[in-house]
Amino acid sequence: MSDEALRVLREPTLWACKVCGSTDGVWVCLDCGHVGCGRRATHPSLGGGHARHHHFATGGAHAVCIDAITQAAHCHTCDNWLLDDEPSCLGALREEIRQAQRRPFCSSPGDREITHPQRAHAPLVRGATGLANLGNTCYINAVVQALSHCAGFRAFFRDFLRASAPVQLGSIEILRQDTPKWKAQVEGGRAAELQLCSATHALLRVLWSGQWSSCSPHEFVHQFWTHVGEQFASRTQHDAQEFLIFYLNRLSEELTGEHVRSAMRRIHLDGFNLCAAPRDGDEPPDACSECSGASEPPSEGGGATAIDFIRELFGCPLRQKVRCHHCGETFAREELSLGLQLVLPPGADAVSVETCLDELVAAHDLQGDCQYHCDTCGGKQDATREVRLARPPQALLLLLNRTSWDRSGGRSKDCRRVTFPRRLALTPWLDAAAVEASPHPSPRPLVRAAQSPSGAASSSPGVAAPHSPSPTSHCYRLSSVVCHSGSSTDVGHYFSYARSDSPGGTRCWRLFNDARVSVASVAEVLSAEASVLVYENVSPDDADEDTTAEEENKSLLTLGERWKMLTQDYLLSLAGALAAAVVALLIRKLLYAHS
């Protein structure tokens, strides 16, 4: 076994295929340390994964490799696993890997977030920082990048526990307390109950600092490898949708915990102020009637509602109506869901998000074994059930269910193309009562414009500009996309696209592929194999910034072409100068020889 192979196996951040970037089931060559995707990867042109391709590329000399996750040894020559391990060799190697997995993590959020960051040579912009893969953590990285580009989520958690937060952003007293003071406010020293919120805050502060091209999210990821998320085993591939829902639920639990709620009551706090954004130069307005209780300590029963920011932001209230065919009575109930689970209808080679939403709200007959128990009739009856959105959310999460099951219980991935728009109007899928209640209903803005104590607008990034109008329709704009590449649900790689700031002050789409961040075109985004879509509510009068993004991409391309031309001119001039020098030297030698 080479020293390079041992070095790679000791460092989980290197466990990614050197060809395709996959982090699932990678194999490490014991001869040279090459990392390639294993036999579960499907590359028809290679007859297997890139680890097998490396074996043939070396003429069969590099035959033995080891799975970085399971530590199982495999021989390419025999095309089989090595069962009779030699304790002195493979046993010692497995112990080295186990020691690497037991590597201690820093206990303070933020300290390890910028461990060995890569400084970019070009000017950086906020929100363009990549996340290192710590060993099959691509699903975490993709979700975090998508959420961090949701303005409401970012504004809350980036300024969470921050002493210099704008006075008009969220819970004033909380945000104007520094971290030690806030932790001291929590009863009984229960600051650990906010550990995931604190880790999220620390990570977003780094991601949106504009100082690093990439960082290692050790502290944040460690939260899910320990007591916070025990089902997410370390360095093992997991489903991004499952992680997203778990992560949001966990944040919600921390924010609505009894000890956190008690501390908020004691210092007279509530959740985010739900008022319209003030105009430029205006003094912070008095609380409106809707938010008149903002300065009052929340009641014992209503405190959770005030501070449950996650469900205020992403909550989709679904109103289910069941009509009994026998008595004609209609029964309604409302459930709050974090995002909408969309099933891909069978049949077509390609489906649209609109079709999936139609399928979600379509009326279904409850008959046979699925009859509805009618309280009025006192027994089971045939009925019709339909589901509608009771109110539009501030931010819309659409989770595309690409998992399909066969009769034998096996599962596979539905790889059909799902088309999705840059702008989406939710009106066709809203409950009739919600549409009739207001001609232009809209969710209440959760984040007010950032204001300095003097009333002037703050330049704090990620917060809506003071002059931005409140949403006046059910129009949503695509904010980020979580994608999965791979032939099955068990194998593949997660990455994300997000609309991000650019140096010119406009916005463009970027591809976040773990630590690598690059500019992407709109066409590339819309053709991606989406798993999660994040939409944000906007006014229909807002300019379509995607057009600006295309212009930004063109300008970047133009700059690249200019740089290429300048480089070519420089190389040509340099080559000409060298040629002239060589000719002059030859002439001088000839003259010296004749003399």
Image: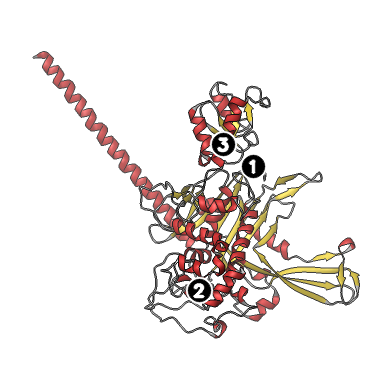
Q: Position of residue 227 (x, y in %)?
A: 61, 54
The residue mark sitting in front, 3 or 1, is: 3
Answer left or right for 277 relative to 358.
Answer: left
Amino acid at the residue labelled 2: Ser
Mark closer to the chain start, 2 or 3: 3
Q: Position of residue 590 (x, y in %)?
A: 15, 17
Q: Residue at x 42, y 46 (%)?
A: 116
Q: Secondary structure at mark 1?
A: loop
Q: Residue at x 53, y 50 (%)?
A: 524
Identify residue for label 1.
491
Q: Secondary structure at mark 2?
A: loop
Say above or below: 208 vs 425: above
Q: Residue at x 29, y 36 (%)?
A: 571
Q: Residues within 10 Å of mark 3 (few under 14, many from 20)?
A: many
Mark closer to the chain start, 3 or 1: 3
- Placement of the C terminus among the 4 image quadrants: top left
Q: Position of residue 23 (x, y in %)?
A: 57, 41
Identify residue for label 2.
171
Amino acid at the residue labelled 1: Val
Q: How is the image coloured?
A: secondary structure
What whole-number distance in Å separates the C-alpha atoms at marks 1 and 2?
43 Å
Name the foreground residue: 182 vs 479.
182
Residue 490 visible to an observer of this rendering? yes
Identify residue for label 3.
97
Q: Residue furthest front?
A: 188
Q: Residues within 10 Å of mark 2 (few under 14, many from 20)?
A: many
Amino acid at the residue labelled 3: Ile
What whole-number distance in Å separates the C-alpha atoms at marks 3 and 1?
22 Å
Say if mark 2 contacts mark 3, CB within 8 Å: no
The residue mark sitting in front, 2 or 3, is: 3
Q: Residue at x 64, y 54 (%)?
A: 241
Q: Position of residue 287 (x, y in %)?
A: 50, 83
